[in-house]
Amino acid sequence: MSISHLLFALTILGTLAITWRAARRTHGSSDYFAAGSSLSAGQNGLAIAGDFMSAATFLGITGILYDFGFDAFIYVASPLAGLALMLALFAEPFRRLGRFTLADVLATRIEPQAARALAASTTLAVSLFYLVAQIVGAGALIGLLFGIAYPIAVALVGLLMALYVALGGMLATSWVQIVKAILLTLGVAALAFLALAESGFSLARLYDQAAAVHPLGARLYAPGGMIRSPFEALSLAIGLVFGMAGLPHLLIRFFTVPDGVAARRSVFIAMLAIGFVFLLIFLVIGYGAVAHLSGDPRAFAGGRLIGGGNMAALHLARTLGGEAFFGLIAAVAFATILAVVAGLTLAASGAVAHDLYDGLWKKGMASERQVMRASRLAAFAVGIIAIALGLLFEGQNIAYMVALAFTLSASANFPILLLALYWPGLSTRGALVGGGAGLALSLAMVLLGPAVMVDALGFETAIAPMRNPALYGMAATFLLAIATSRIDRRRYKRKKGLAAQAWPGI
Amino acid sequence: MSAPGSEPQAAKLPYLISAVGLFLLLAPALTLWSDVFARSVLGTPFPLGLVVAVADIALILLLSGLYVRARNRSDHPA
């Protein structure tokens, strides 16, 4: 058994032990869905960081830096700006108004049944696309790292994530995320230390070494390697910033702390953790991979990096730290995947059990026990769907699925949540028309866009030209929600003849 | 969210920080192209974009930290 396999087994056993311990402390739906609102700001901050920093961010950003250089910065700064937005707009109101899901918050402003239907649809759409992207990436990554066949890897991740959520709920998911965030931070810091040490602890020397061996030369540190125009950069940034601020699996984390003060603190702690990791990747690890991998023949086959740019961080770990360090970083990457998919599964199963089953089907009359049972069943159902879609999408470009999740979140979730919390004029029909149309429009634009039609399906041109259509989807949602709400207000006034009275907003 | 107009000066700080923070939303895209400007106009060989990038992230974190402190103080005044 190699060191990689040993650490892989330890990661699974460790996370299952956390789940078993959490399951013993979970007694009611408050514990199950919101960890009893008992997490401290520090714990929730680390859990938010663990929930967001996926293998795609750790390995993907390093890969973009390795291939294209500076343009990776947009993927580094945008999530932080999105968290700043989440902090200013959503952290405290979510803690004050919500209990278990996004629908709880929406239901305080619009008709509850409509709120549950809308919030459950957007939560499921965003979480499932995000989940499938992670599962496809996980299958390929685990296959490469540990020599496990793709279908077995996908089934293993799907089964584990369903087990964490079904048995341990939010408490287990939170602790898996906290442990993963600490492991990832330490692993990235160690990798950055080794990369700097190899260049005599001189960043300038490391940058010179990287520029000397990369085809882009000194342009490695200039924009334009991947993103061709300022408009495209802006549209991508808008999708990432507003999409980040509307991600359901991050927003439900505000229900796990006791009050608004802790909710705000937890976002800031998450920003510090994510900022630290991202800066090390951006300033040292990505360019370190360019500088130090070129002299290691083990990393290349036929003149190309084995596994592509996404594997640059792992190759760097092997080149600088040997097999043991490679095994450690591979195990960290695996823990990273598990933590993110568990958070997504929890958000999706909560929406099914709390909003669709209890809110819509049972009209709020289901017992606590029934809701928890429904959520556990939903976790396994989500796991099975994710495994099936993961097998179906094998070998597909996962970038467009992540882009789709962020686009859906920015187009459908963010505008409706913002209007519900800060615009008294939002009507139920306005929220449904805006949110529904935004969801459908953004879905259509991504599916008919170049990422799917050209890159994935092989057409010469795409029907929708935008690679990052969040800008249009978001604008359409705002416009339709506001216009429909204003029409509703006029109709209401005309019908009641109460022009002087305040619009009730529902 | 209460209207800021009727509150003491110190309580306006969160709203001020929120307003400044909104400009940061455009920072990622602007930062990419500030480097083009630096290179084409100033002609500097130094990777200025990296400095701007770090400053951008530091500013986002600093303003967020100030915002959390100010809002939490206004919620729980000593």
Image (cartoon, rainbow, N blue to C red):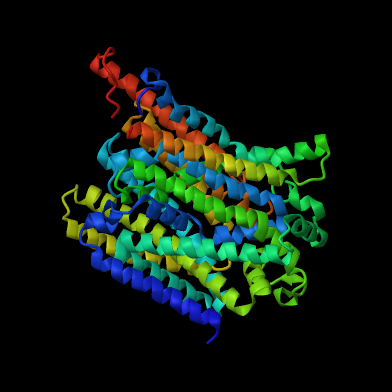
Residue A181 is left or right of residue A280, and the answer is left
Residue A81 is left or right of residue B73, and the answer is right
Q: Quadrant of residue A111?
A: top left
Residue A402, percent across and down? 53, 54
Residue A385 shows in this picture = yes
Residue A217, percent across and down? 81, 55
Residue situated furthest front in the rendering: B78
Q: Quadrant of residue B42?
A: top right
Residue A129 shows in this picture = no
Of the 4 image quadrants, the one containing the N terminus of chain B is top left
Residue A376 is left or right of residue A270, and the answer is left
Q: Name the residue nearer the viewer: A426 or B68.
A: B68
Vertical arrangement, residue A176 with respect to residue A407, above or below: below
Q: Name the residue nearer the viewer: A221 or A151.
A: A221
Residue A186, percent across and down? 53, 64
Vertical arrangement, residue A70 with respect to residue A332, above or below: above
Of the 4 image quadrants, the one containing the C terminus of chain B is top left
Q: Quadrant of residue A167?
A: bottom left
* Residue drawn at x 40%, y 32% as measured from the top left: A419
Residue situated furthest top in the rendering: A500
* Residue drawn at x 48%, y 36% as measured from the top left: B66
Q: Name the residue nearer the viewer: A429 or A264.
A: A264
